[in-house]
Image: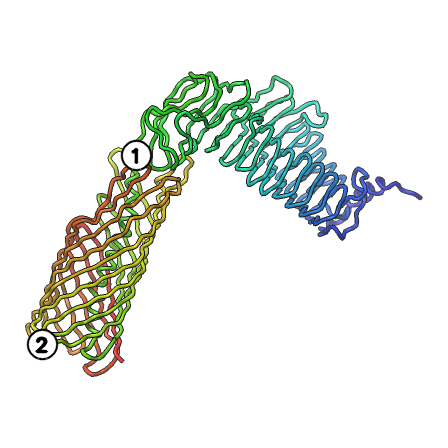
Amino acid sequence: MKIFPALATCLSLMLAAASPALAADITYPGYPLGPDFENKSDSLFPPASSPSGNTVTITGGSIAEAYSSQVLSGDVSGNALTITGGVVNGSIWGAATHNGTAFNNTVTMSGGSVVSDVHGAYSQGGDATNNRTVITGGRVGRIAYGAQADSGGNAIGNEVSLSGDAVVTSARGGWASSGNALNNRVYLDGNASVGFLTGGESGGVAGSTSGNLASGNEVHVLGGSVSTRIRGGHTYNGDAVNNLVRIHSPAYLAPTVDIHGGDTTVAGGDVFTGNTLDVLAFRGTVNSVQNFQFYNFSLPGSLGNGQTQVGIAGAAATDLTNATVTLLGVEGGGIILQPGDSVTLLGEATGMADFTTSVPKGSLLTYDFLVSTASGALTASLSKAELVPGSAALPEGRIAGLAFANQGADLIVGPGMAGALACAMPGEGWNTFGATQGGWSRYKTGSHVDVGGVSLLAGLARKTPLPVGNLTLGGFLEAGWGEYDTHNSFNNAASVNGDGDTRYYGGGILGCLELSNGLYMQASGRVGRADTHFSSGDMRDGMGQEARYDYGALYYGAHAGIGYLFRFNERALLDVSSKYLWTRLEDDNTHLSTGESVHFSSSESQRWRTGARFSHAVTGTVTPYIGAAYEYEFDGKARATAEGYRLRSADLKGGTGIGEAGISIMPAHGEGGLTLDLGIQGYVGTREGLTGSVQLKWEF
């Protein structure tokens, strides 16, 4: 008995409904073609016994249609169709059912060509939910659907994503011929090109005569280009409400583009309520903007006095009579507006009462605007611009880097110098020495900065006998790794906290001349690079992005000191000294993550420290010690400018009392081995905190 091909296909599909589900994994070219639902020969689809979990891949060739699943009855889910090349002369479906639901199916396209439509999924008589179409390359001749629901089904939560160099005529997140289109999404990004975008559509397509609700749908234009129309939601004769259209820079919209929050074929439905337009740093000209209740504008930093953000090429002005307009902020960087400057947000607009608003410019400035449609356009006129109080937090990251570099200097003049002197024996050549120091300190900077970390130093030193005493010279490498927290409080604004990390790498030389009478003179020099990262979740721009920056700069340092050793007996020794310590951190230019340019001027620390240390050997190998000193910082200021404004500086200026205690353990006389010095230092005053130090020497 002869059976027509279409009937044979239908019988096999009905038999599949009663058969166990077996997932298929097929690739074309290589898999045989056959007739599909509509008796189109040369179509690609898995066996009828596989309604779910199938994987179909097209890499080349030419076919009529393609499915990753097709059934006459039952649900289809978890299917995936991928096309990387070739030509499909008709349409492709992630999955299709003529009596069931279609959910969690996917079409992915990175190349090739589809002459007609791309469907993430299709359901006739059931719902189509959470299906996706992702196109990153290739061409689609007609429409890319996230999913379609026909004959009363709903399209819910489906998505189309276009990016790369994809070229698509039209895209719809979800379409329901007579059901509801709810919470569907379309994304456009990269260099993708499309004519028409619709978040969700109910009815009005392919001869349908009715439509219900299109609500909660979204269109996100992150990049790419659009040539014809953008609609959040469309309905044939129902309501299109609570939809979102979001336009970002650097997207391009042709002057022929109409942007509608809601749209209807038959007049009478609600196409206004709850629809939202977000214009996020986008600039361009479109034909018209209509049917939004809420308008949110983030102004691009490039928008200058007298310039327009969204121009209107068509004759229809945007009616803002019952709408709400919100300015989210202005991008950081770019042009700095001055009081009296005016910009146009929307080229043709009427019906809105004037209002004033204060918005952030990046994360550092506040702009006060008068917003009006009195001129026939939606304009914003600047009345005042000022720094936000929290901008004072930016130099705190710089001061943390300077303070930590100073801790490296403390290691050099303290344990480092002591280690070099201890390791070098007269006339014995070069010997190794090393020291490390770690701890936590709070610096009062006008607010305060807490800095914690560890510093290392290692080098070689030798001691040369002279007629008047001994001369010790050495060279060293140094490095330090730290973290810090900053805190700024204000009388008229919320506190701003920040944090970050800082590190330095460098090297230097040191020397000490010890005279026979107990007088000594010492000095050191160092150079290296310091890098610091800063961020603050309390400093954000109008889009909620937190302020962050990174800077790197050369540092230089030197110290000079003089001291005297009072020997009371063979075991007791008092070391009295006075030292000058200088550190310079070079200037640097950086950018905040929120767009602003920041210039840090060079910073210098100039400290004078005077103190004494008393040590007493309790045995021939163990010597404890205690000490006290006073240090005064004469400068230590971090200065910065941003966007042409001078920021409030932070500084380390002030006095600090220092106390120390420790113990030195060395091998017996004439024996090699490890010499170890353990110390602890406490600070009160401008600097408060505690550090510990370790000094090492190894004799062979």
Above or below: residue 647 compared with residue 624: above
Marks 1 & 2, CB-CB < 8 Å contact: no
- Neighbourhood count class around disc 1 (C-alpha, 10 Å): few under 14, some 14–19, many 20 upward: many
Residue marked by disc 1: 387
Q: Nearer the viewer, mark 1 or mark 2?
A: 1
From mark 1 to mark 2, how far is it between C-alphas?
64 Å
Q: Which residue shows up at 68% across the image and 32% down it?
A: 153
Q: At x 57% / y 20%, what residue is drawn?
A: 270
Q: Label 2 neighbourhood size at 10 Å, few (<14), some (14-19), many (20+)?
A: few
Question: The N terminus lies in which quarter of the figure?
Answer: top right
Mark 1 or mark 2, which has the lower sequence index?
Answer: 1
Amino acid bearing label 1: Leu
Quarter of the figure with residue 384: top left
Query: Which numbered marker is on residue 108?
Result: none
- Callout 1: helix, strand or loop? strand
**Residue 192, above or below 477:** above
Task: Locate residue 697, reporting x and y percent.
Answer: 25, 73
Residue at image location 61% in from the left, 34% down from the top: 194
Is residue 441 at least partly visible in the picture?
yes
Q: Tell me if residue 413 comes above or below residue 300 in the rendering.
A: below
Residue 570, which numbered label?
Answer: 2
